[in-house]
Amino acid sequence: MKPERYQARANKGNAMIKRQRKFIQRTRIKRRPPKPVSKERKKTKLQQNKDNPYSRYWRDKCEPIWRAIVLYRAGNKSKISACTHNLQVHHLIHRSRSMTRWDLNNGFVLTAYEHKFMVGGPHGPDAWMFAELLAKRYPEKLAWMKQHANDQGRVCWHDVYVQLTSIAQKET
């Protein structure tokens, strides 16, 4: 048997351990209870974008269709040099203008060289020469461009996509 003084020390040690445990329990970070799980599945980002007619999903689907229609109407040739290779479609009114971005009159077919690097091309310091070329060869394009230069507003991309696909089906 242990003497009483040793027993008293053991009891003090046990009491101290109990106090430390209570302190640790009080200072623990309390976790939030888990959120209740709904029975409906959350929609994916893609599905959310498909459901929103103003989303980039629909805007990005319009680009290749618009390009194909404009190229088809131009006979798959550049309107300046009549070349048929490396074609690009130039927006007469900048593509940031959503009201005219996918308008079929806003497209002008050029080769990549004519579009970016040619003197008198639509980009760069000699853009005025391109405007003169439009005035001489394509006055109807220049008139359309001046008429719609300040169009502003919000466009429903899904509606534009539907219109472009119906035009593409009729023309091809």
Image (spheres, rainbow, N blue to C red):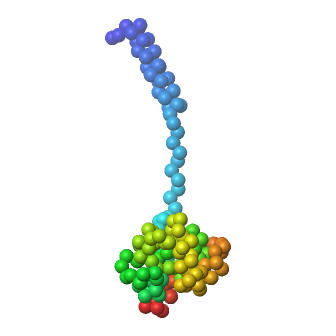
In the image, is 69 to the left or to the right of 157?
left
Q: What residue is at 45 percent from the left and 15 percent from the top? A: 12
Q: What residue is at 59 percent from the left and 86 percent from the top? A: 140
Counting labels gives: 0
Closer-to-camera residue (151/139): 139
Q: What residue is at 36 percent from the left and 79 percent from the top? A: 85
In this rendering, does residue 157 appear at all?
no
Which image quadrant: the C terminus? bottom left
Q: Position of residue 6 (x, y in %)?
A: 39, 9
Q: Position of residue 104 (x, y in %)?
A: 53, 82
Give the residue furthest to the left. 1
Q: Position of residue 141 (x, y in %)?
A: 57, 83
Closer-to-camera residue (71/125): 125
Can you tell which quarter of the image residue 136 is in? bottom right
Q: Position of residue 156 (x, y in %)?
A: 59, 75
Closer-to-camera residue (98/80): 80
Up/down of 165 relative to 101, above or below? below
Q: What residue is at 41 percent from the left and 76 percent from the top? A: 111
In the image, is 151 to the left or to the right of 10?
right
In this rendering, does residue 171 appear at all?
yes
Which image quadrant: the N terminus? top left
